[in-house]
Image (cartoon, rainbow, N blue to C red):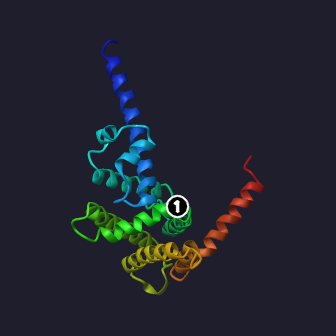
Amino acid sequence: MAETTPRRAQRGEYAKSEVTRGAILDAALEVFAQGGYRAGSLREIAQRVDMSEAGLLHHFKNKSTLLLAVLDHRDEQSRQIVDFDDADGVETLRALVKLARYNTSIPGVIELFCTLSAEATSPSHPAHGYFLRRYDYVRTSITAAFRKIAAEGRLIGGLDPYRAAVTTTALMDGLQVQWLLDPTSTDMADALAEFFRGLVRGYDLDALEQLLDARAAEQNPAP
C-alpha cells in the first residue's frame, strides 16, 4: 500500500498539469487571435489563467513553443469535425464543409491562422516547419479522400486526386481571406460545397438520402 500512494499522487499531479496546459492553450489561442502572435504577451496569457509568467513558462519554455502548441491545439479541435480516416471519401468532403461553416464562428482564430501562414513562408519564422508539415498532411489526407471517391467512379472528368486536393486546399485558404476582408462577399461553406458538387457525382443526392433515412428512423424506431 505504501508504494501505491506516491503513484496515485503522480497521476493526480499529471492530470492537474494537463488541465492547466489546456487552460493555457485556450487562453493563448484567444490572446493570439485577438492581437496577433507578435502583440500577444505571455503576461496577458498568464493573467487569464491566474498564474505568473514564470508559472506559465514552467509548462511552455518560451513563446515560440507555446505558439506551436496552440497551433496543434487548434488542429486537434478541427479533427473533432473532420475525420480523414472515414472510409467514405464524400463524407470527408462534407466534413470540410462543416469545418468551413464552423470557422465563421471564430474569425479571430482564422485571422491568426491566415496571418501566421503568410509570415511562416520565411524559413526563420518559428511556425515555418509547422506549416510545411500541416500542408503536407492536409494535401495527403484530402488526396486520400478523392482517391476513395475515384475508386467508386464518382470523381468527374477523370480528375487527378492529388490535383483536386491541392485545389481544394487553395480554395479553402482563399475563401478565408476573402471572408475576413468582407464577410458579406462569400459564404465559405456554400462556396466549398458548390465546388465539390462540380467534382463528385451524387454529392447532394447522398446527403438527401441520408436525411430521408434519418427521418424515417425517427418516425419508425426499431422495436
Residue at far left of view? 124
Residue in the foreground of this view, choosing between 72 and 143: 72
Q: Is residue 63 left or right of residue 103?
A: left
SS for tag 1?
loop
Q: Residue 19: x and y, percent?
A: 43, 38
State which quadrant residue 220 falls in.
bottom right
Which residue is rendered at x = 25% and y = 70% of the image? Answer: 122
State which quadrant residue 15 falls in.
top left
Which residue is rendered at x = 57% and y = 78% of the image? Answer: 186
Check disc 1 and give the amino acid type.
Ile
State which quadrant residue 14 falls in.
top left
Q: Residue 179: x and y, percent?
A: 52, 74
Does residue 19 sit above or below 35 in this rendering?
Answer: above
Residue at far top of view? 2
Location of the N terminus (image quadrant): top left
Q: Which residue is mark 1?
A: 106
